Image (cartoon, rainbow, N blue to C red):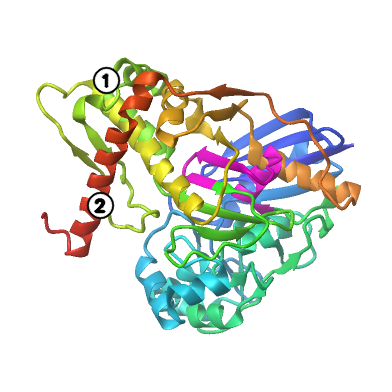
Amino acid sequence: MLVAGIDSSTQSVKVVLCRAEDGTVVGSAAAPHPDGTECHPRHWWQALEQTRDLLERADAVAVAAQQHGMVALDEDGAVVRPALLWNDTRSAPQASALVAELGGAETWAGRAGSVPLASFTVSKLRWMAEHEPDNARRTAAVMLPHDWLTLRLGAPEPVTDRGDASGTGYWSPGEGRYLPEFVRAALGHEPVLPRVAEPAETVGETPWGGRLAPGTGDNMGAALGLGLAEGDMVVSIGTSGTVYAVAPRPAADASGLVAGFADATGRFLPLVCTLNAARVLTSAAALTGADLDGLAGLALAAEPGAGGLTLLPYFDGERTPDRPDATATLAGLTTSNATRENLARAAVEALLCSLADAADHLVAQGARPRRVLLIGGGARSAAVRALAPAILGTPVTVPEHAEYVALGAARQAAWALAGTPEPPRWPAPPATEHTAAAADATAVAEIRGRYAQLRDAGRLRDTIGGQDL
């Protein structure tokens, strides 16, 4: 039997067709999405329709999609406005206001599992209520991207899963239920919200007669695709950077740095997300006039520490730390170190320092990683793989490149097909282990120290209204 997993991300849709018993990929397809921080859901459906021939071969299907996106529907089920996506930061003031109004950070962390930022659905609802009151009044139901696609694929009612629901800001991982007072405070009224299905429940039937699994968020899909166990920490470098680990208990970090998500299996997935990840590399490649492979070669040709250059890579604002209006900063530039090689090295070191900070936040919340897995498009960079062990402070395992979000969705579909208490056991992906070079290990304290100084100086400038100290 065959199962299909759908990864509907910010930039594209990717579909894998797998054998249900062992996960062997027998087919794949992809189609692009429009770029930007908002998108009408019809574009996701139009892209998915391009993969229809592959999907119709599947006995079961599941969707994993970008988290947090706000899909507002009217009472007839029509889309009210283009979906605001996770990377849209306009709702930062509304996030802060909601935290203050509803008991502060401790209350949000304890009840919703996370202190909301601009990326969270609850913050976007408040933004719409304030800036588009007519749209807010028309909104009769609110869904997430994967929920909307699951409904279009044949679910008879709006349905979601606990993993994706945990990223809304109005569903409690600890209590396992929606928080209606939170969503009312954001939108002004209580809309219809998707039913939260069990992890392996069959929630509908596709038009061609296949089973439809509940689906999940993209990070939860990747965790399922990788077969993560307790003690595994993932560092993922995609459009966003994410660091997460499987945990038996929900997290509740009042600092707001760690999001206390649920996973797709009944456990939990504490996660730290950065807004700037693989695009740090593409931006640096453009600045140096290189492609991504060329950028890696330039970075590896430079000495550790980039000759004193330090980059703060907040090109598009930042989510962790919460600095939505921040910009990138390059410090330490002199006539002697102003080379393409040093700029490339500084970009790779900055990306990894940002992710190392994220890993430190997880450890502070009790994560005890036995191994670190490095995945995502950014992990294909030879420079990232070479420098990661020193800056992250541990050997890293790099699984063979694959569409792990889509594979996780396919595994969930196979689980629904099997009807077993646990997901089917699929072989672990081939992987290589990377350790730190001696020179990199010697220089890492200085590199991270300079990065921390620049990061914290930027926070102080934000605090005093953007004035230089």
* On-image quarter of the N terminus: top right
Q: Which residue is mark 2?
A: 456
Q: Is residue 438 left or right of residue 155?
A: left
Whether 155 is drawn above or below 21: the answer is below
* On-image quarter of the C terminus: bottom left
Give the magenta range.
216-243
Q: Is residue 198 left or right of residue 350?
A: right
Q: Quadrant of residue 111?
A: bottom right
Q: Amino acid at mark 2?
A: Asp
Residue 70 at x, y percent in the picture: 54, 64
Residue 115 at x, y percent in the picture: 47, 67
Q: Are marks 1 and 2 in contact (CB under 8 Å)?
A: no
Q: Which residue is mark 1?
A: 341
Residue at horizontal 37 percent and vertical 18 percent from the top: 294
Q: Is residue 435 left or right of residue 335?
A: right
Residue 429 at x, y percent in the picture: 69, 28
Task: Reply yes or no: does residue 227 show up in magenta.
Answer: yes
Residue at horizontal 58 percent and vertical 66 percent from the top: 79
Q: Is residue 186 visible?
A: yes
Residue at horizontal 28 percent and vertical 19 percent from the top: 303
Which SS class for mark 1?
Answer: helix
Residue 386 at x, y percent in the picture: 44, 22
CA gap between label 1 and label 2 equals 26 Å
Q: Amino acid at mark 1?
A: Glu
Q: Is residue 50 visible?
A: no
Which sits in the foreground, 242 or 125? 242
Residue at horizontal 36 percent and vertical 59 percent from the top: 322
Task: Reply yes or no: does residue 226 show up in magenta.
Answer: yes
